[in-house]
Amino acid sequence: MINIANQHVEIFCQPLKPENNLSSFTYTNALLQVSEQLISPVLHFWTLENTVILGLKDQRIPHLPTALNYLSAKGIHYFIRNSGGLAVASDSGILNFSIFLPWHIIGRELKIDEAYQVMTDVVSVAFPEITVKTGEITHSYCPGTFDLSVNGQKIGGMSQRRNKSGVVIMLYLSINGPQTLRGEIIRNFYSKGLQEEENRWHFPDIWPTAMTTIEELIGGSLSLNDAKQRLLNVFIDRGNQQLRQVMWSDNFIQYLGQESTTINRLQERLQREE
């Protein structure tokens, strides 16, 4: 088992407004590009307001304009991320949390399952009241092999990106708020987008009750700040001074510009569907 709890970690937080939503993945991808410059693992926290994040596969929805209009009519922001997967909800009750692991710090390249296990272990330590398991929750939104669940109900989903220098494991955690409503919105998005078409693309058959929040599971109030602090407390030695130096480097700024161009081009393709 890979244990990073005793290592120094650097912290980067982004409470984003809708006009800056794309920064979440722009910074994620740029940080991964400069993995060789990082001198420790990095913890990246970010939040969005009332947003649906689409995956690349969602571009194949046969009636995508209708589905997007449904979100707009409900006042929900949306954008497409430049990675695989399917639609997920993000709002004031969802905490997005990523761990960057440079290979030169870990000592070797981790297998895919090993990297996911690092994140699973961190969540399990942060929330000892619940027993977290991994495995696909078929009727959740964006189901995947490494869904995090408790008693069969999904509380979060993971994905990862990697290159020759490191990996970033990305997690969204449902902390509090109306998880059933989130499920209904994503279910309706696909329903509007498919209409009577055959579901040849295997978009999920979402059951809103297949998902829940950590607050509901522990039976007490849990704010995003509380959840963030619990995750931080897993790590003994924390800071952000060294990360600031990396993020001011010419290398990082160059990658940030490149990633911004890439993800903005994706949005242009999406806008043509509106």
Image: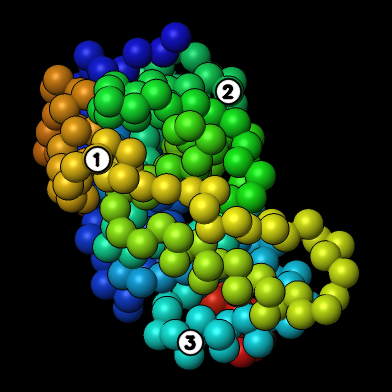
Res 120 seen here? yes
Give the alpha-carbon distance from disc 1 to disc 2, as whole Å. Answer: 31 Å
Q: Is residue 247 above or below residue 92?
A: above
Give the alpha-carbon distance from disc 3 to disc 1, as whole Å. Answer: 34 Å
Q: Nearer the viewer, residue 269 or 148?
A: 148
Q: Nearer the viewer, residue 170 or 226?
A: 226
Give the alpha-carbon distance from disc 2 to disc 3, as whole Å. Answer: 37 Å
Secondary element at tag 2: helix
Of the numbered discs 1 and 2, the one sitting upstream in the chain is: 2
Secondary element at tag 3: helix
Which residue is labeled 1 in the image? 219
Which residue is labeled 3 in the image? 72
Of the numbered discs 2 and 3, the one sitting upstream in the chain is: 3
Secondary element at tag 1: loop
Picture colour scheme = rainbow
Which residue is labeled 2 in the image? 113
Tell me if mark 3 has few (under 14), some (14-19) or many (20+) residues whose alpha carbon lies within 10 angstroms of its own.
Answer: few
Q: Position of residue 143 (x, y in %)?
A: 62, 47
The three-letter amino acid code for the residue at tag 2 is Asp
Q: Residue at x 69, y 58 (%)?
A: 205
Q: Nearer the viewer, residue 158 or 98?
A: 158
Of the numbered discs 3 and 1, the one sitting upstream in the chain is: 3
